[in-house]
Amino acid sequence: MKEMTLFIGHGSRDAEGNEEFLEFVQNVRRQVPNQHFEACFLELTTPTIPDGIDSCVRQGAERIVIVPVILLAASHVKLEIPEFLDAARRKYPYVDFVYGRNIGLNEQIIDLLTERFYEQVGTLSAKEVRETAIVLMGRGSSDPDANGDVYKLARLLWERTNVLTAEVCFTGITFPSLPDGVERAVSLGAKRVIVVPYFLFTGVLIKRMKGILEELQAVYPAVPMLMAEYFGMHRRLLDIVLDGRGEAAHKQAFMNCDLCQYRKLASHG
C-alpha cells in the first residue's frame, strides 16, 4: 500500500511565513528521504487541503496520513479539518485517511520554549534570571480550552526556568493583550521582560507584535524588553512533528502523560 503524509499548515497573509512552512516540510523530506511528504494550507493561501489530497491521490496514494502542523486544538483542528476529510472520504472511498493530532502540549514543546528563552538570557546570572519575567505570547482563540492550554504552558515554563513570573498574552481574538501582559510583569517588579512567542513561523502577527514591543519599551525605558525567536526551523520542532506523524501512521494517540511528574518518578522507581 502506497502511503503519503500530508502536512497542513495554518496559512498566512504574509508570504514569508508560508515560505517558512514549506521550507520546514522540505527539511522533513531531507531528514526522512524514504517517505513521501506533501504540504498544504488550511486557509489564506494555496495549495488548499483539497488540493493537497488530490495531489496525493494523483500520485497513487492508497493511504494518506494527515498531520496538522498546528499548535493548539481549536475549531480548525476540531471541526474544519475533519469536514475536509469527510468530503475526501466521500470523493475517494478507496483511500484510507488517517488523521493525526495537532502538536499540542508535550515535553519537547516545553524544552523548545525554554531554549528560546535562554537564548535571550544566556549571559545573566541566576539572580538576574529570577528577576526576569516571561510573557508567553499565544495566538488567541475563541476556544477557551485552547486558550487554557497556553496558561498551562506558562506555568510549566515558570516551573522550568525559575523566573519571577510567567505571564500570558494573546495577539488577538481574546485577552490579555501583549501590552496587558507586559504591564502586569512590570507591575510585579520584573527587572527585564522576555516575550516568548508560542508560534511556529513568522507572519503578520509576529511582525506586528515586534512593533508593539518597541512601543512598550519606550513606555518602560528602565525595563529591558526582548522577544525570543518563534519555533521556525528548530530541530526539536521537526522531531515533534515526526513523532506525531509516527503516532498517526500507527493509529496510536497518546495523552500528554509525559508531562506528569508522577509518571517520571514511577519510571525511575
Image (cartoon, rainbow, N blue to C red):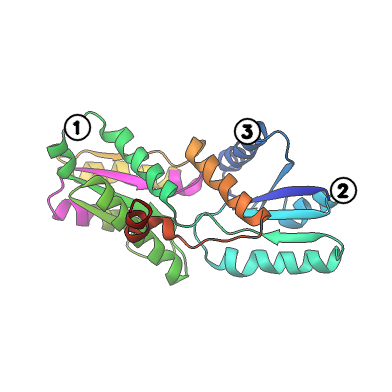
The first of marks 3 and 1 along the sequence is 3
Circle 3 SS class: helix
Q: Is residue 137 above or below residue 35?
A: below
Magenta-drawn stretch contains 3? no
Q: Can residue 170 be seen from the camera position used here?
A: no
Residue at 82% in and 48% down = 2
User: Which numbered marker is on residue 60?
Assistant: 2
- Circle 2: is it few (<14), some (14-19), or many (20+) Cα within 10 Å? some
Residue at 51% in and 45% down = 203
Q: Quadrant of residue 88?
A: bottom right
Q: Residue furthest top?
A: 123
The first of marks 1 and 2 along the sequence is 2
User: Which numbered marker is on residue 31?
Assistant: 3
Magenta-drawn stretch contains 193? yes
Q: From mark 3 to mark 1, how far is it between C-alphas?
A: 35 Å
Q: Quadrant of the C terminus?
A: bottom left
x, y percent for residue 98: 71, 60
Circle 2 SS class: loop
Which stretch did the figure color magenta? 183-206
The first of marks 2 and 3 along the sequence is 3
Q: Is residue 1 left or right of residue 248?
A: right
**For the residues carrying marks 3 and 1, which lies nearer the camera in this image?**
3
- Residue assigned mark 1: 124
**For the residues carrying marks 1 and 2, which lies nearer the camera in this image?**
2
